[in-house]
Amino acid sequence: MRIEELKKKLWKNEAEKRGISLTLFIETMVEGNLMRLERSELIDFLEKQENIFSKIQNNINQFARIANTSKSIDNELLIQFQQKLNEIVLLKQEQNESFNKIYEILYKYK
C-alpha cells in the first residue's frame, strides 16, 4: 500500500500514542473497530459514571425523605442539597466532554 510520507508519519505517531503497531492501527481504523484499550477505558468510564450518579441520586432521595418527613428544611441541609445539585451539574459537564472525546475517537478516521 502506498501512502504519502506525511500521512504515514501522522498515522505512525497516532499508533505510537496508542501503543500499537502501524499495521494494527490501520486495520482497526479501516474495519471501524475500537481497540481493546479504548474499549476497556470506555467500559471503566461508564461504570464509574453509573456509580457516581447512583450515590448522588441516593443523597437526593435522602434529602427528599427528610424534607417530606419533617415538613421543614434547615439551612445547613439546604446548603448540602445545593452542593449535591452543583456536583451533578459539574459531573454532567465532565461526562459530556468525555462523550465528545469518545465520539471523536470512534469517528476520527471515518
Image (cartoon, rainbow, N blue to C red):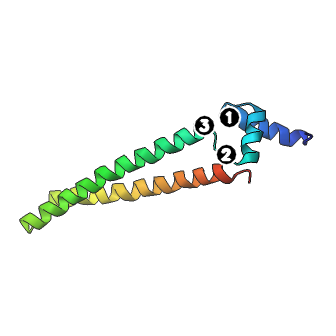
Q: Earlier in the sequence, mark 1 or mark 2?
A: 1
- Of residues 83 and 47, the one nearer the viewer is 47
Q: Residues within 10 Å of mark 1 (few under 14, many from 20)?
A: few
The residue labelled by disc 1 is 17
Task: For residue 50, say whether it is visible.
Answer: yes
* Tag shown at residue 33: 2
- Please give the name of the residue rendered at 43% of the width and 57% of the height, measured from the top-left corner: 92
In the picture, the quarter occupied by the C terminus is: bottom right
Q: Report the mark closest to the observer, 1 or 2.
A: 2
Q: Report the mark closest to the observer, 3 or 1.
A: 3
Q: Position of residue 37 (x, y in %)?
A: 59, 36
Q: Identify which amino acid the numbered label 2 is placed on.
A: Asn
- Please give the name of the residue rendered at 70% of the width and 31% of the height, measured from the top-left corner: 20
What residue occupies the far front of the structure in this picture?
A: 31
The residue labelled by disc 3 is 36
Q: Position of residue 33 (x, y in %)?
A: 67, 45
